Amino acid sequence: MAFVDSGGRTNGRAGRGLEQAIKLLATLICLLGGLQAAANGWEHAAISFDALVTALNFEHPETRRRAAESLGLRGDPQALPPLRQRLARPERNPFVRDAIYSALGRLGDEEDAPTLIACIETEPRAEIRARCTTALGQIGAPQGRDVLLDLADSDTETDSVTAAAVLALSAYPEPKVITDLGRIARTQDVRAPAAIAALGSIGATSATVHLLAILERTEDPKLRALCIVALGRISDASSVPALLKIIETETDSRLRVRAVAALASVQSGSPTAALVELLSDPLPAIQLFAIHGLHQSDARQAGRPLSLYAEELLSRLVGYAKTGWRLNVTQALEALGLLTPALRALADLDPDDGTTAMLETANLADPRAIGGESLRLKDALYRGRRAALYGLGYAASDQALETLLGVAGLHNSDPRLRAVAVRSIGIHGRPETVPELLLALEDPSPEVTATAARVLGLMQANHAVPALLERLADPNRQVRFEAATALGLLQDQQAAPNLTALAAGDPEQSVRTAAQLSLELLQNR
């Protein structure tokens, strides 16, 4: 079997052997078999680095293009020399050149900046000059800044190249660059959207004044939306008044939602009171971003209004449940979609104030058969219950622990919820719950069993040692891993022989490592 490369040389007859020929054939099949390159290069992950480098020199240009693309996506700097060599031959196919320049940008070596600048100056195809411009920004080399500034103001370049240059300037968070981008953004010509996006990407608070000026003077909804998104990325407290004004006066609901999302991203001097008021906005999307903003603010004073909000949602859901969820399914899904993030926020901000809402959510009735929407509703209920059981782990009340130990938690029909309940029982850390956790070690679900093993170890439940020793022979590797780890935490010497055997003979490396670490804990006791 033989393969002929682009230089006419024959591989396979000069001592490479059948194995290399098969490798190259596999490469050709993968590269030419119609597979589209994914954003992370997954389709090429099984192809060896050497095979991809070899493919850069194949006669078929599509093979070379895909190989260059994959080498760039992998991010291995060892790909730089062969990519540079391919360009220097020279590479005559424009699509292959485009892929190589893109790969050089991804790999980000400043040594390639002159090559990309030469491309911008000499490449006849505008789309490839735009690609080189983007790659130059990805590298962020000092010599690239002035080139990009000149391109951004060029009267002779195409719009695609100048827009690429404006975006690429976001790699240079310098006062002069920010000032120039602000000037370009205020021109409201075809470069303005790219300049606004670049200001947001830079993320410097000095860009805020430029974005606020554009918001004040333009009525273009697209530019306003871009400005709002950029302000959200910068998260500067000085943008709060303008964002609140948009929320209060804007008639375009899409802009209002974007403004709330930007407001929610502001961390310093977080507008907690304004976000609390937005919980009563008629638009569910605005309520959702208000919840996220309150959660991110880490403001404990948001706990009470969030708990009242969650309880109001639950009053509706309880009514829907009484009908067996046969009516108002859409409204129920909407309410559950808001309740779940509210409970997550309460778990972090004020689980004690959120206990009532968590208890009610955990005990919501299951839906009866309601046709095609039943699965969506059951999934939404699962996510809400999961958030509730998680939060109850941090609630101090006895009722929270009783619910975790009951039919809504540890004895739930859903093993995923049982596992969450076990985890939350462990957070409570009450010694009297150990017998229930020992029973959980016998659960048919590996997720529940593994979680119980971990919790018992962290709780220093020495009575669990015999049961944990049995779990070392469990068919599930995660269960064996957690049992071995727990035995190390408990530091009971009777576990040494079993852990020694596990460290030497388990088929899974992670389990052997856990057993070895636990043995070291026993030896250092």
Image (spheres, grey):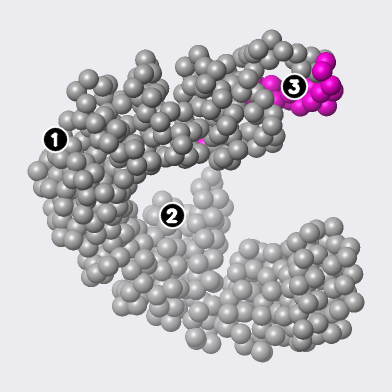
Across and down, in percent, residue 147 comes to: 29, 32
- Image point 70% across, 85% down: which residue? 460
Query: Disc 2 marks which residue?
Result: 333
Query: Disc 1 marks which residue?
Result: 187
Label 2 with label 1: CB-CB less than 8 Å: no
Tag 1: amino acid: Thr
Q: Which quadrant of the figure has residue 454? A: bottom right
Quadrant (top left, top right, bottom left, bottom right) of the C terminus: bottom right
Q: Nearer the viewer, residue 160 or 372?
A: 160
- Image point 45% across, 33% down: which residue? 112
Relative side of 436 to 367, left or right = right
Quadrant (top left, top right, bottom left, bottom right) of the N terminus: top right
Q: Earlier in the sequence, mark 2 or mark 3?
A: 3
Q: Secondary structure at mark 3?
A: helix
Across and down, in percent, residue 129 comes to: 37, 23
Query: Disc 3 marks which residue?
Result: 25
Disc 2/disc 1 C-alpha distance (Å): 45 Å
Give the magenta-colored segment's residue range: 13-40
